[in-house]
Amino acid sequence: MNFSKLVPSIFYTDIQLGIKLFVECLEFSIAHNELNSACPFCVVDKDGLSIMLFENKEYAEKEHPEYRLVTANIEEVYEKVAAKFPELLHPNLSKIELRPWGAKEFALMDGQIGIRVQQW
């Protein structure tokens, strides 16, 4: 067996929250766009990563997942996010911290999901 990529699906009550987090804040690009369809969705891409964003109130109300994005330069990511989107910083991990397991981390949340940005 051989796999080349894992592509998670994230469900939002309002897909614009996901667009703000992934496209505007984390600088992903919209690779496939069906935002104006009856069931809005899109695929966002960056650096070989892909995520499917869906607007689906029923599923969004059932799920509030947390994801990790690993980077080689957490300070650069933090500076960009904190300067432009401080409202997305998670109040419990709003600054870069060295965690007990040896990784540097800070966290984001958009009302639907959590993202931990991590550097080992």
Image (tube, rainbow, N blue to C red):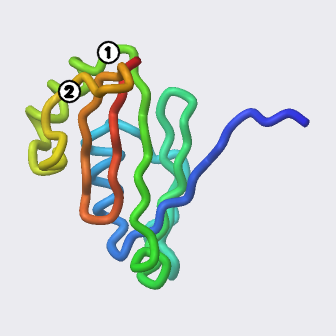
Q: Quadrant of the C terminus?
A: top left
Residue 39 at what x, y percent from top left?
Answer: 52, 78
> Where on the picture, by quarter, is residue 119?
top left
Calculate the distance from the C-alpha at mark 1 to the C-alpha at mark 2: 14 Å
Label 2 environment density (alpha carbons within 10 Å; few <14, some 14–19, many ≥20):
some
**88 sits to left or right of 72:** left
Q: From what the image shows, is residue 19 above or below residue 29?
A: below
Identify the residue at image location x=13%, y=43%. 85
Residue 7 at what x, y percent from top left?
Answer: 61, 47
Residue 97's disc is: 2
Q: From what the image shows, is residue 22 above or below residue 42?
A: above
**113 sits to left or right of 110:** right
Identify the residue at image location x=34%, y=45%. 115
Residue 33 at what x, y percent from top left?
Answer: 50, 58
**49 sits to left or right of 28:** right
Q: Quadrant of the N terminus?
A: top right
- Residue 88, visible in the rendered structure: yes
Identify the residue at image location x=44%, y=46%. 67
Residue 32 at what x, y percent from top left?
Answer: 55, 52
Circle 1: residue type: Asn
Identify the residue at image location x=51%, y=82%. 38
In this orientation, which residue lies closer to the viewer: 107 or 98? 98
Which is more N-terminal, label 2 or label 1? 1
**59 sits to left or right of 77:** right
Circle 2: residue type: Glu
Q: Residue tagged by mark 1?
A: 73
Label 1 environment density (alpha carbons within 10 Å; few <14, some 14–19, many ≥20):
few
In this orientation, which residue lies closer to the viewer: 68 or 43? 68
Please say if the residues under marks 1 and 2 sit with CB atoms less than 8 Å apart: no
Q: Secondary structure at mark 1?
A: loop
